[in-house]
Image (cartoon, helix red, strand yellow):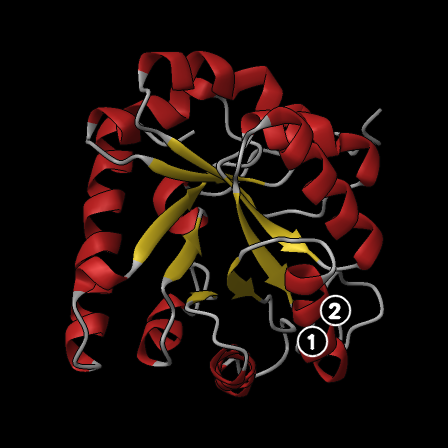
């Protein structure tokens, strides 16, 4: 667990790097939202970032988020929480209730379930479509070749407003082509948001148009080892 001062320093360093990358690309740093990914870290590790004024965070699992974020949100009503991990349909009700953005919509049944729950609950989290830019069979996301049709279905069939696209390039690949591909899919579909780039490549993502970067390790340090479990 990183000390409080380290987390604050790390946060400031990441924000400075975001500003520098944005300036190099001729963009404003304000056009890039830093999603501080806190998965596997307890609330005590998150609080120093909140005390430093940061308000946008990400989590991978609904169950883990439910254990720590309601109290943090109660203390900080302006906090915004993004789901950046895969979402199972049996967790949709809970996800819509807790998260302010869902970045991993990637199939019609999930899109329909999210749309139905939003209509039922009245909550309207932002919706991002996850694109599997590397066509990796083990990874979530719609195939690039199917992205246009799926985005159209989300809008026309399910009534979802698509705020952005998200991708996670293969670890072994140079990320630039993946970010460029996501940007091109977004452009031809009239989608403004691009959630791409993590601790190791967010500056590259910013140069290629990222509007959201998902940074965890560079802020909070290495994640503690956790026992793998299947969410109920």
Image quarter where the C terminus lies is top right
Residue 229 seen in the figure: no
Secondary structure at badge 2 equals loop
Badge nearest the viewer, 1 or 2: 1
Give the residue at x 48% y 76%: 190
* Rendering coords of residue 96 (x, y %): 62, 32
Percent position (x, y) of residue 147? Answer: 69, 76
In the image, taking residue 47 as reference, residue 131 lies left or right, namely: right
Q: Relative to residue 16, is residue 166 drawn left or right?
A: right
Q: In which quadrant of the rendered view does residue 90 lie?
A: top right
Examine the image and state in which quarter residue 91 appears: top right
Local crowd size for mark 1, using a 10 Å CA cut-off: few (<14), some (14–19), many (≥20): many
The tally of labels here is 2
Quarter occupied by the N terminus: top left
Q: Name the residue under label 1.
A: 147
| Circle 2 crowding by C-alpha within 10 Å: few under 14, some 14–19, many from 20 | many
Residue 105 placed where, x, y %? Answer: 68, 54
Q: Which of 195 and 223 is in front in this view?
A: 195
**Earlier residue among tags 1 and 2:** 2
- Asked if the residue at tag 2 contacts the one at tag 1, i.e. Cβ–Cβ closer than 8 Å, the answer is yes
Residue depicted at 83% across the width and 64% down the height: 138
Identify which residue, 144 or 117, lies in the foreground.
117
Q: Position of residue 226 (x, y in %)?
A: 68, 31
Is residue 168 depicted above or below 183 in this figure? above
Considering only vertical position in the picture, is 120 above or below 13?
Answer: above
In the image, 202 versus 149, the foreground residue is: 149
**In the image, what residue occupies the spot 67% across and 71% down?**
152
> Which residue is tagged 2?
142
Figure check: 207 above or below 33? below
Residue shown at the point (68%, 28%) measured from the top left: 120
Element marked by disc 1: helix
């Amino acid at each position: 667990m990183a000390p409080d001062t380290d987390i604050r320093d790390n946060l400031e360093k990441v924000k400075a790097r975001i500003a520098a990358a944005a300036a190099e690309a001729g963009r404003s740093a304000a056009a890039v939202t830093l999603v501080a990914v806190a998965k596997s870290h307890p609330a005590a590790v998150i609080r120093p970032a909140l005390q430093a004024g940061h308000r946008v965070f990400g989590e991978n699992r609904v169950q883990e988020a439910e254990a720590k974020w309601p109290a943090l949100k109660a203390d900080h009503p302006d906090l915004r929480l993004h789901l950046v991990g895969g979402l199972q349909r049996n967790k949709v009700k809970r996800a819509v209730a807790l998260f302010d953005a869902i970045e991993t919509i990637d199939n019609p049944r999930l899109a329909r379930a999210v749309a139905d729950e939003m209509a039922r609950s009245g909550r309207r989290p932002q919706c991002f479509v996850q694109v599997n830019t590397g066509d990796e069979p083990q990874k979530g996301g719609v195939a690039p070749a199917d992205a246009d049709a799926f985005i159209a279905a989300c809008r026309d069939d399910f009534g979802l407003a698509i705020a952005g696209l998200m991708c996670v390039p293969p670890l072994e690949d140079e990320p630039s082509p993946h970010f460029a591909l996501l940007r091109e899919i977004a452009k031809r579909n009239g989608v403004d948001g691009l959630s791409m780039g993590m601790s190791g490549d967010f500056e590259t993502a910013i140069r290629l148009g990222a509007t959201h970067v998902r940074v965890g390790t560079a802020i909070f340090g290495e994640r503690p080892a956790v026992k793998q479990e299947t969410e109920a």
